Image (cartoon, rainbow, N blue to C red):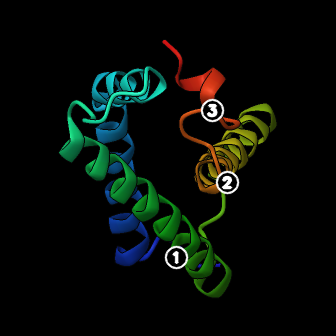
Amino acid sequence: MPARFSPAQVALHWLTALLILAQFLNDDAIGRAFRATMRGAAVIPGGWLVTVHVVAGIAVFAFALWRIALRLTRGAPPAPADEPRALQIVAAATHGLLYGLSFSCRSLASLPGSAPSGPLAACTNS
């Protein structure tokens, strides 16, 4: 196992974090666009932000795949030796949950009809 993460792993980590932050900051525009689409509006308010949201979602998915490939090929440093076992378990569970969310959000968004009335409708109705 390596002593530290590679520069590519660190860069992908922070790029992914920034993209996810952008997704959260873009939530209001996406909600307005979704509600307008549900009302049958021909013009989607904040149309370019919807495009940014979609592109960022695809990028998060691609970066997550890339990060997993790097982790499988380069490995990851071990947890600090003095870290309590309970914290190691929480860290591993959180790590798995974040990857699971990254993949499930992208997968659900790809389903036919996910917008406006598909499986994400309950999540995006504000």
Q: Secondary structure at mark 2?
A: loop
3D distance between C-alphas at marks 1 and 3 = 31 Å
Q: CA distance from mark 2 to mark 1?
A: 22 Å
The furthest residue to the top? 126
For label 1, the residue is 66
Q: Label 3, label 2: how many angstroms apart (C-alpha)?
A: 11 Å
Q: Residue at x 70, y 49 (%)?
A: 100
Q: Earlier in the sequence, mark 2 or mark 1?
A: 1
Q: Amino acid at mark 1?
A: Trp
What percent of the width, then of the height, locates residue 125? 53, 17
Q: Which marked residue is nearer to the observer: mark 2 or mark 1?
A: 2
Q: Nearer the viewer, residue 82 or 10?
A: 10
Residue 56 to residue 118: above or below: below
Direction bottom: furthest residue: 73
In this rendering, is residue 120 above or below 4?
A: above
Question: Considering the numbered disc 3 on the image, is that residue within a helix, a strand or a loop?
Answer: loop
- Identity, as a three-letter code, of the amino acid under mark 2: Leu
From the viewer's perspective, tell me whether residue 33 is left or right of residue 117: left
Helix, strand or loop at mark 1? helix
Check whether the beta carbons of the residues at disc 2 and disc 1 lie within 8 A of each other. Answer: no
| Residue 111: numbered disc | 2
What amino acid type should be assigned to the residue bearing mark 3? Ser
Which tag, 3 or 2, sits closer to the chain's start? 2
